[in-house]
Image (cartoon, helix red, strand yellow):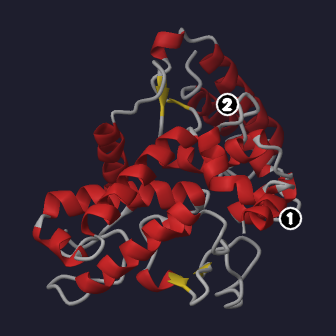
Amino acid sequence: MAATSLPQYLSAIGCRHTDVGLCSPCTGSADPGVFDFCPVVGKALSGYAKGRKASIPADQLLDYKVYLPAHVASAALDLVLAEVSASGSNPELLLLERDRCERLRGLMFLSFNFADFGRSDTHAAMLDDDVSLFGDGDLHFTHRKAKGLSGRVDASDWLWPADSCPDLLRAVAFWLRLRSLMRVLPGACALMWRLPWERAGFSTSRLRTVFANTLSSLNRCPPPGRKWSLHCIRAGPASECNALGIPLSRIRRQGGWGPKSDVPSKKYIDPSCPPSLEGRRFFDWLTPDGHLRRLGAA
């Protein structure tokens, strides 16, 4: 039986009990208006679904998500930097070539969100003013939906110091310059990833299309039977950081998880992810000895 069919059968069983005034074995309540399954049943359904997925042939696992490797985000960042070198002194020329500008947006979105653990507030709802570069080169990102916090956090809460990931900060600086030029165009808005000529109502659905088009332009695709989604942008950095030996406490901090959360280890970190040079490009500054290497380089 398909895992998606089980809830319907269980609901029918529950109704037979509540109709005669008995507690439903599925919800634990005699109230026919209670539809949520009790924890034991919920866990059983989840386990059954995982077991069914594991028994499906590999060539049918079309919706099986895997983490996005750092080499994909690194390739995107390289192309952003190539654009910076080509038009850094005249970024306004990009606005005359919409296709080129849209491609740059996708590359910038992918590389920035990978570095920032693909937080939900850096996706469709991100604003231009959420990111700023201080005079010393430090990047500050204002969190609007950080877990465990209400409202905006203190303005001193930066994410990346100037020497953390220089390539990324150079790309961000260029993109912010370009965004400031866009503000005077008709249709401009404060959303970081929406371009002025695009239709209003920029949503996560639209961003999925941007993500898919960017992967296509990079000529990168997941293994057969696997899938990359916006969720995988979050799993990628968590897995890459774990492979580099970065403490879980720092992974939680950078990913916006609570200080005691087990979500990263249970849902995002893939322990099979090997350490990589591309992962180190983004996250070496978070490793236990990364600070000493940066001091030595200075």
In the displayed structure, does residue 1 sit left or right of residue 193? right
**Depth-wise, is mark 2 or mark 1 nearer the camera?**
1
The image shows residue 31 at horizontal and vertical percentages of 72, 53
The image shows residue 157 at horizontal and vertical percentages of 71, 83
Note whether residue 24 is visible. no
The answer for how far apart the CA atoms under marks 2 and 1 are is: 41 Å
Say which element carries label 1.
Answer: loop
Residue beneath the point at 86% across and 59% down: 249
Q: Which mark is residue 13?
A: 2
Note whether residue 232 is visible. yes
Which of the two discs, 2 and 1, labels the residue nearer the N terminus?
2
Residue beneath the point at 54% across and 48% down: 233
The image shows residue 152 at horizontal and vertical percentages of 64, 87
Say which element carries label 2.
Answer: helix
Residue beneath the point at 86% across and 55% down: 288
In the displayed structure, does residue 50 sit left or right of residue 198? right
* Dot 2 amino acid type: Ile
In the displayed structure, does residue 71 sit left or right of residue 202? right
* Rendered-image quadrant of the C terminus: bottom right
Report crowding for label 1: few under 14, some 14 to 19, many 20 or more residues within 10 A (C-alpha): some
